[in-house]
Amino acid sequence: MSGFGEFEFIARLLAPLSKGHAGAFALKDDAAVIAPRAGHELVVTADALVAGRHFLESDDPALVARKALRANLSDLAAMGATPLWYMTSLVWPLGTDRALQARFVEGLKADQERFGLTLIGGDTTAGEGPFTVAVTAFGEVPAGKAVTRAGARPGDRLVVTGAIGDAGLGLALARGERALDGEAAAALLERHYLPTPRIALAPALREHARAAIDVSDGLVADAGHVAAASGLALALRLEDMPVSPAAGEWLASQPDEAAARLRLATSGDDYELACALAPERVDAFIAACREAGVEAKQAGIFGAGEGVTVSFEGRTLPVERGGFTHF
Amino acid sequence: MSGFGEFEFIARLLAPLSKGHAGAFALKDDAAVIAPRAGHELVVTADALVAGRHFLESDDPALVARKALRANLSDLAAMGATPLWYMTSLVWPLGTDRALQARFVEGLKADQERFGLTLIGGDTTAGEGPFTVAVTAFGEVPAGKAVTRAGARPGDRLVVTGAIGDAGLGLALARGERALDGEAAAALLERHYLPTPRIALAPALREHARAAIDVSDGLVADAGHVAAASGLALALRLEDMPVSPAAGEWLASQPDEAAARLRLATSGDDYELACALAPERVDAFIAACREAGVEAKQAGIFGAGEGVTVSFEGRTLPVERGGFTHF
């Protein structure tokens, strides 16, 4: 291929990203050595992105790198973990040139600086298929403090961070499916290409939440996973679902607000957090989120039973498809 | 696709493989929680296999699963680590049917039982390319006892476990490139499809070795990596390189034994260990290997300088290509 050789790619481009961790052995060894600090546990997650499915072949490789990292960081955030390290397994299409490889590594570098991560290992190969990026990310929590999906109790409130549906609208724009004017369109595209994992909220989550999930398959599906894992039902109120000004502009242009909000609630890749909180914790959690620069909003309630009921201004909506699945 | 849906595949086929670890949350959560035992560290490695490059499209998916696990276990073994957990990121070709997916999971199950592993997470998707399996594997070592590539000293002996070159000959047979008679051919094919990671030798490695690597790119290349990481030269004697009876049979049929041994020493996927040992530790290490059921043999010496000199019965051989690279 016209790109770097395997060893050169690792030594020249990737090894500098491993400097922050002695146990990465400058990516020259068979494996990395890691340990949590005393009194802590590690949280570990893996997510793979494939060109043509999770991003467009024509997307900037730096953005692909950053999105791959952020998808994993979002999973760590939902567990209340502080990110520490990551590994990448890369499958380059045959013939990928050096400039694209270097651009991908620029994206890794930008986000590892932004989020305080260090590359500790991985694998690099090439194949007769689309570019594939598998990331494994590691974070840390105080022992026993990881937030899972299964802890919600009847009466707990569903609180949702940030804004739902922007990434889905951004994807539609990226595909040229619909037009929206300049500023709003730019904001939505940014949220599609560069979602912000809510790792800044991990401490607040650990302190206040009984359960949480990151919203990657759509709010209805993901909040439903919390309900199911906790053995509960969920009543989700779409009028209370947080939306961005840009999505609000799009909503205003839609003939049926209930249907439009349902579309936002069933589109993927928001990377927001959906949390279950005891009623008396809601205000403190929302205040803690605000202090970290993120708005959060109460948008539902967990109760006995099963399944998700979605309503808009008191009217129950039929939900055909809860969210995105990757097959 | 005609296979299982993403959630069904995970819930029905993969979740049962996670039973051994409570922190895997039955694969229902965003991430897994892990920690080493007190006084220990974790060792973590990632390796991706792509159809058409690392295995044949027509290979039995169960063997592909086992080989993917074993490639990673071999890396853990080379660090002196005891394997504990693994994660898989799978990219299925569009249209893969359920029987193939189930067969793949059978392979995971067989080897996780054999090697005492538990599945703790991962990701499952589909794409317009070849089947891709990215594995991240986790092991444990007593704190500070991981064996790296960088610890060899001048005068240390190179000791090689098992037999070198079988997998390369097995690959040639699998491709129909050469004929060898029944029993020997079967043995070589087995070593190609199902290499044995030397995890049984991890304790002996930790006790005796100053440096080690697993032989995946060819003995010349990999032993050379130990020399380079340790800032040393290596003199490798091909007449002392351990070979199997089946490879011995092939060697006997070759016109030029030096060239034939060099081919064995530069073919990949042996998953043996190449170790640097102080001279006074060699006998104890070889005895400890034998106790664990594996022969090991002294086949070289590290010294001041750099590079690998390969000789056969006193004659230095020119080496054009040290081993396999994945680009």
Image: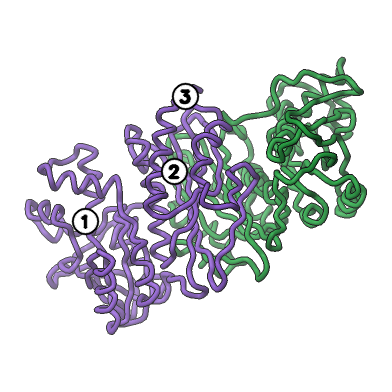
Chain colours: A purple, B green
Q: Secondary structure at mark 1?
A: helix
Is residue B272 placed above or below A113 in the rendered structure? above
Q: Secondary structure at mark 3?
A: loop
How busy is the neighbourhood of tag 1: few (under 14 within 10 Å), some, or many (20 plus)? many
Q: Which amino acid type is shown beneath numbered disc 2? A: Ala
Q: Quadrant of residue B229?
A: top right
Distance between mark 3 and mark 1 Cα atoms: 38 Å
Front label number (2 vs 1): 1
Confirm whether residue A194 shows in the render: yes
Quarter holding the N terminus of chain B?
A: top left
Same chain assignment for discs 2 and 1: no
**Residue A95 appears left or right of B157:** left
Q: Which residue is mark 3?
A: A95
Q: Identify the residue shown where x is 61% and y is 47%.
A: A25
Quarter holding the C terminus of chain B?
A: top right
Instruction: Write down the chain letter for disc 2.
Output: B
| The one of B232 and A185 positioned closer to us in this rendering | B232
Distance between mark 2 and mark 1 Cα atoms: 24 Å
Label placed on residue B126: 2
How busy is the neighbourhood of tag 2: few (under 14 within 10 Å), some, or many (20 plus)? many
Residue B279 lies, in percent from the top left, at: 89, 45
Task: Give the number of marks.
Answer: 3
Q: Identify the residue shown where x is 51% and y is 67%.
A: B25
Residue B87 lies, in percent from the top left, at: 55, 54
**Residue B283 appears left or right of A270:** right
Instruction: Write down the chain letter for disc 1.
Output: A
| The one of A65 and B112 positioned closer to us in this rendering | A65
Residue A35 lies, in percent from the top left, at: 59, 62
Q: Which residue is mark 1?
A: A264
Same chain assignment for discs 3 and 2: no
**Residue A201 appears left or right of B156:** left
Q: Identify the residue shown where x is 57% and y is 71%.
A: A38
